[in-house]
Amino acid sequence: MSQQASEQEYGHYIGGEWTDGDGDGDTFDSRNPATGETLATFQRGTVGDVDAALEAAEDAFDEWRSLSYIDRAEYLWDIYHELRERHEELGEIVTKECGKEISEGKADVTEAWHMVEWAAGNARHPHGDVVPSEVGAKDAYMRRKPRGVIGCITPWNFPVAIPFWHMAIALVEGNTVVWKPAEQTPWCGQTIAEMMDDAGIPEGVFNMVQGFGDAGAAITDDERVDTVLFTGSAEVGHEISGKVGGEPGKLAACEMGGKNGIIVTEDADLDIAVHSAIMSSFKTTGQRCVSSERLIVHTDVYDEFKERYVDIAEDIAVGDPLEDDTFMGPAIEADHVEKIRKHNELAEQEGAEVLVDRFELGAEEIPDGHEDGHWVGPFVYEIEYDTDLRCLKEECFGPHVALVEYEGEIDRALEIHNDTPYGLAGAIISEDYRQLNAFRDRADLGLAYANLPCIGAEVQLPFGGVKKSGNGYPSAREAIEAVTERTAWTLNNSKEIEMAQGLSADITTSED
Ligand code: UN1
C-alpha cells in the first residue's frame, strides 16, 4: 500500500493469502484524525476469519519451530531493512493515521526497527542456562521452546512499534502469530502485513485479521491460542487476563495504562522539572500509556513550577501533525474527545482549580482544512490531595494534568504518588541522590526515571507495570517469557542412576 489514500478495499492476510474473508462484506474506514478524511477502507473480520487464521497458524507451527533461530531471524532482518529504508514514508503513514506529530510518527517506526533488531539479533544469543547438578554424572540445563500460536492485540497509539514488540519476538522464538491491529490504525496493519509477505515468511506463520473487539475476542477466547499478548486499555486487558487465567495452559501477557506521576522535590532543578513535565504530559497529546497526568510538587518550589509550567501549557503548539513545528496533534477520535471532556468535568466537580482550559480550541488555532479533526488542547488544574478523589486515580489518556502540592519529606510525595490503582511509569526530579534512590526503591511502578520525562523507554529495557498496569510479563524484552516454555533438561552420563537430595535409587522387593 502506498502513502496515498486509496479507493481499494483491503482485506486480511491469512495462510499466506490476501483475502476478503468469509464474505459478509462489512467494511470500515480508516480516518485521518487531523482532518476526518477517509484514508482507506478495510474488511471487518468475523469469527470465521479468525477461525481460518488460527487454523493456518496451527498448521504452520511444526515446520516453523523446526527451523533454527537464526533462519527464522533472517526473515525479520529483511523487515528491519525495509523499515529503515521507508522511514520517512512510514512515519507519515503513522502520523496521518493516528495523528501523532511527525517526529513521533517517525520515532514509532524507529522503535519498530529497534525491536526487530533486538529480536533478530537475539537469535544468536544463548537461550537458556547450564545449571549445576548435585550429582557429578548429571548435566542440567534450562532450555526454551516456543509455546505455539500467539494471539496479538495491539493499540492504535504505537501502530508500528508495538506490533513488533509482540510479533518480532514471538516469531523469532518459533511461534506462529494471529494479529488484530487496532481498528483505528488498519492502514499501518496493512503495511506491516505487506512487509511480512514481501519478506516471504512461510504461509500461515504470520496472519492478520482486521477488525474490532469481536474479532479480538474471537482470538483471545480460542483454545488454539497458547499465549495472548495484549497492549491497550486496562478495561479490556483485565477482561482478557481474567478469562485466560481460568484456562489451564494458556497465558495472557497484558500491558495496560497508568495514572503516572512526576515528583518534583524541593531540591529539583526547575528547568529539568518543567521540561520533563511538559514532555510527559503533552507529547502524543497525552495518549501514551506512560503519559503523566499527575505532577506532585513540593511546596517550596510549587509557585515557581506552576507559573512556568502553566505558561508553556497556555502556548504549546497544537496543530497539523505533519508540520515540524507542531507539538501536539489531535486526539484519535470523536469518542475519545468526549471521554477527555468527561475527565475534565469530573476534576471540576471534585473541586479542581482550573489553571489552563484549552479543551475547546479557538477557531484560529485550528489549521485550515482541519476543521473536522478531533482537536483538544491542554487542561491543567490544581487540587488538594485527597485519597477519595477519582480525578487523581482514573486514567484520562489525554492532555489532562493535575498539579498537587505536598509538604515535608520524600515519604509524603511517595505516599501520594503510590495512591493510585496503577503503577506503570513515573519520574522524580531532584538533585538529591537520597530522594532519587527512595523513589527508585519505593515508587510502585515498572518504569522509573530520574531527571527525565517518564516517556520514551528504549526497547532493550523491560516494559511493564505493576498493580492494574500489567500482569507480570512486560512487553518488549521480557515478552520472551510469555511466548516460550522453559524446560528443565537433565541428562545422565552414567550407566548408574543416582538421585539428588540423597534419595535412594535402590529398588527393594519382597524378595530382599
Ligand atoms: C505506550 O505508551 O503506549 O516508553 C507505549 C515510551 C514508548 C512506548 C510507549 N517507548 O514512551
Image (cartoon, rainbow, N blue to C red):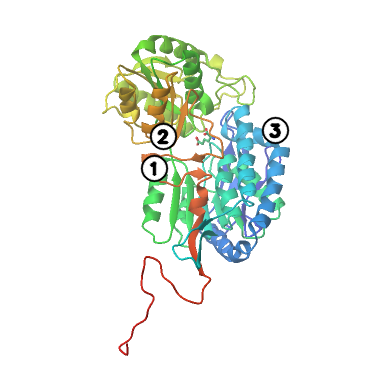
First along the sequence among labels 3 and 2: 3
Q: Which amino acid type is marked by label 1?
A: Glu
| Residue at which label 2 appears | 258
Element type at mark 1: helix
The amino acid type of the residue labelled 2 equals Gly
Left or right of residue 427: residue 189: right
Q: Residue at x 72, y 51 (%)?
A: 198
Which x, y percent locates residue 327?
57, 21
Whether residue 171 sits left or right of residue 445 in the image: it is: right
Residue type at numbered disc 3: Glu
Do callouts 1 and 2 mark residues in contact (Cβ within 8 Å)?
no
> Callout 1: 10 Å neighbours few (<14), some, many (20+)?
few
- Other-residue count near label 2 (Cα within 10 Å), few / some / many at <14 / 14–19 / ≥20: many
Q: Secondary structure at mark 2?
A: loop
Q: Which residue is mark 1?
A: 235
1 vs 2, front mark: 2
Indicate the position of residue 167 as horizontal and vertical percent values. 57, 49
Q: Quadrant of the N terminus?
A: top right
- The residue singled out by tag 3 in the image is 88
Cα distance between the residues tagged 1 and 2: 12 Å
Q: Are marks 3 and 1 in contact (CB under 8 Å)?
A: no
Residue found 27% across the figure and 28% down from its top? 387
